[in-house]
Image (spheres, rainbow, N blue to C red):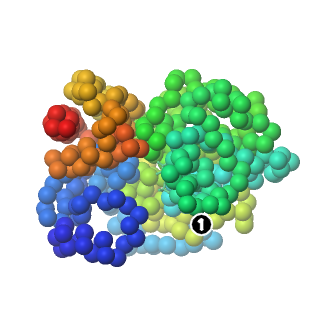
Amino acid sequence: MSNREIIELSERYLMATYARSPVALVRGQGVRVWDADGRQYFDFLAGIAVCNLGHCHPDVVAAIREQAGTLLHVSNLYHIEPQARLAQLLVEHTFADRAFFCNSGAEANEAAIKLARKYQKDRGHGRRTEIVSATMSFHGRTLATLTATGQAKVRTGFDPLPGGFSYVPYDDIEALADAVGPQTAAVLLEPIQGEGGIRVPEPGYLPQVRELCDARGALLIFDEVQTGMGRTGTFLACEQEGVAPDLCSLAKGLGGGVAIGALLATEETAESFGPGTHASTFGGNPLAAAAALAAVRTLLGDGILPHCRRMGAYLTSGLRAAVASHPAVASVRGRGLLVGVELAPGYPAAHVVRELLERGFLTGTAGEGVLRLAPPLIVEREEIDALLAALGETLSSL
Ligand SMILES: *Cc1c(COP(=O)(O)O)cnc(C)c1O
């Protein structure tokens, strides 16, 4: 089928929940993808921070092929070797002692919210039910996680929303200190806000949040669905702040392109999830777990994290040198290969995304005013140079 035919079929039969770009992608390899008409693109969005190892990484493909021919699915009523090995690997490389597997970021956050409330109740703190999150955050599209999401546009139209959520401005420790009290079960934050515009907090904010939570008896949940899996140059972004949460959600890049989410937890909090408290039919099934096991092993083993830090610095300094002085650019921010180019008022990011698509680059927005760049972590200098040139041309043509 051609682009046109696929687009017609898609527009005829799918619910219109996405404003899709007018291309149908049919093949990917490394940093490149091809559409149905055979045109090539450099992928600077990586399936929205999913394909961190690039498209069709051979190790992930081999693991999926092997597992698909052996055992696709058994339920969590039985023990599953790749799932147990994946949990071990995640525990060995993070603050966590245990893992629970699900299928998406929203589900991982749902699990975190449930576990935080149950943990407080189990300790006799039945009044501690509230989840404090930040404005401009993004935590998912289920009822609980869209309620935790501090953006009205995500919540509008879905009343009544579940109770027990409140919001504070991000990167404002005083506001958080005012909001966290004897009613608080947990504080839920992204270490860097992704969808809300690639917002990096001031150094010291996250350690202060940790101290505050400890002093007030609240748990700390980091949503690393977007920042985790090496995206910011370390396995978890919170490592760079020297802060460990009690709970941490992962998804997006975890499965190397296959749907899987995880909730990581300390031993103390994990105890509150016993048989019958939480479950997922597909969570951590043999196929998804085998893909994730290969993805995490490759990420940790192949020098990809230092490469991400080098390429992130190269991209950010390249942007600062090439386009930051352009009147359409307000700021360049981010960490590792999660980078935002904030545009000046009157320059919609979606327009820049369209122009870059025309020039053969897939990029995205983060909110209305920020161009989001999140290429595979294996991206090389030449590809970054090409993106910088295309962005420079695009900005000049505005
Ligand atoms: C994408 C995202 C989610 C939601 O993940 P889904 O897999 O789409 O449910 C949650 N939190 C953050 C920070 C995200 O970037």
Q: Position of residue 151 (x, y in %)?
A: 53, 46
- Which quadrant, please, contains the N terminus? bottom left
- Which quadrant, please, contains the C terminus? top left
Question: 175 left or right of 242?
Answer: right
Q: Position of residue 344 (x, y in %)?
A: 33, 32
* Mark 1 closeness class: few <14, some 14–19, many ≥20 residues within 10 Å: some
Question: 386 left or right of 19?
Answer: left
Q: Is residue 246 among the parts visible in the rendering?
A: no
Relative vertical location of residue 84 with respect to residue 3 in this rendering, above or below: above
Identify the residue shown where x is 56% and y is 34%: 170
Identify the residue shown where x is 29% and y is 30%: 329
Q: How many marks?
A: 1
Of residue 164 and residue 282, the one placed in the foreground of this image is: 164
Relative vertical location of residue 32 with respect to residue 1 in this rendering, above or below: above
Q: Is residue 180 among the parts visible in the rendering?
A: yes
Q: Position of residue 75 (x, y in %)?
A: 57, 72
Identify the residue shown where x is 42% and y is 37%: 198
| Residue at the extreme left | 38
Q: Quadrant of residue 146?
A: bottom right
Residue with the mark numbered 1: 280
Q: Quadrant of residue 210?
A: top right
| Residue at the extreme front | 346
Is the CB of mark 1 within 8 Å of ligand 1? no
